[in-house]
Image (cartoon, grey):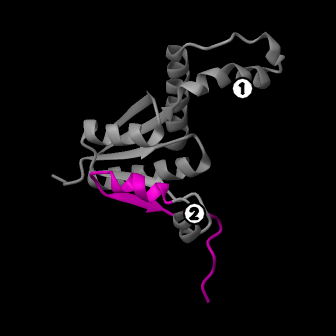
């Protein structure tokens, strides 16, 4: 039995998080670990939901309701997460995937999921061109990661094609 039992990959439906998910899937398949895919939304996203929906459908934004219910926001995001995983993970095989959509601040919610689900590894992408400016300008990432009770894989962002070494 592998020591690695649960891998957490937080996603935001971006290309970077799709690559995180692919990487986490390969790790989970290799180690026979369960994969937990997490999407965190905030309450303020509920207020922007109808604006985004109106723009997508070409409707004027003046006719939108004042607020969307949190339940509706969470169910819409859960459906988005389901489709995102289906699109990214073509052949899951024997892989166990848990999907979670939660409301809250991202760092605190990720930490809570790590503790509640007894996560053994977290997969994250560094979203800047270089790690050093990121760490110097945004020490927030280090503060967040230092609170995690498990190892974290910090992936560099995927860029194609890879540079050729001479």
SS at mark 2? helix
**Which quadrant would residue 48 be assigned to in this image?**
top right
SS at mark 1? helix
Q: Are marks 2 and 1 in contact (CB under 8 Å)?
A: no
Q: Main secondary structure of the magenta part?
A: loop
Depicted 44 relative to depicted 132: above or below: above
Residue found at x 54% / y 36%: 84
Q: Position of residue 31 (x, y in %)?
A: 27, 54
Does 150 appear in magenta?
A: yes
Dot in front, 2 or 1? 2
Residue bounds of the magenta highlight: 139-166
Q: Position of residue 91 (x, y in %)?
A: 45, 43
Residue found at x 41% / y 49%: 25
Residue 86 seen in this snapshot: yes
**Residue at far left of view:** 1
Q: Position of residue 15 (x, y in %)?
A: 61, 49
> In what quadrant of the picture does the C terminus appear?
bottom right
Residue found at x 79% / y 24%: 55
Q: Which mark is residue 128?
A: none
Q: Earlier in the sequence, mark 2 or mark 1?
A: 1
* Mark 2, residue position: 137
Q: In the shown orientation, is residue 13 left or right of residue 34? A: right
Q: Mark 1, residues whose alpha carbon is within 10 Å: few (<14), some, or many (≥20)? A: few
Residue 94 seen in this snapshot: no
**Which quadrant would residue 51 be assigned to in this image?**
top right
Q: Which mark is residue 52?
A: 1
Depicted 31 relative to depicted 40: above or below: below
């Amino acid at each position: 039995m592998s020591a690695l039992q649960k891998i957490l990959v937080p996603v935001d439906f971006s290309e970077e998080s799709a690559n995180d998910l692919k990487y986490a899937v390969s790790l989970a398949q290799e180690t026979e670990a369960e994969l937990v895919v997490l999407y965190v939304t905030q309450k303020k996203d509920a207020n922007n939901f109808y604006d985004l929906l109106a723009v997508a459908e070409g409707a004027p934004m003046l006719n939108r309701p004042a607020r969307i219910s949190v339940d509706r926001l969470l169910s819409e995001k859960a459906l988005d997460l389901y489709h995102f995983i289906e699109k990214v993970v073509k052949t899951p095989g024997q892989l166990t995937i848990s999907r979670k959509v939660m409301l809250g601040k991202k760092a605190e919610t990720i930490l809570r999921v790590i503790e509640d689900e007894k996560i053994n590894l977290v997969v994250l992408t560094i979203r800047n061109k270089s790690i050093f400016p990121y760490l110097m300008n945004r020490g927030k990432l280090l503060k967040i990661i230092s609170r995690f009770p498990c190892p974290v894989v910090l992936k560099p962002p995927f860029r194609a094609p890879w540079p050729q070494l001479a």
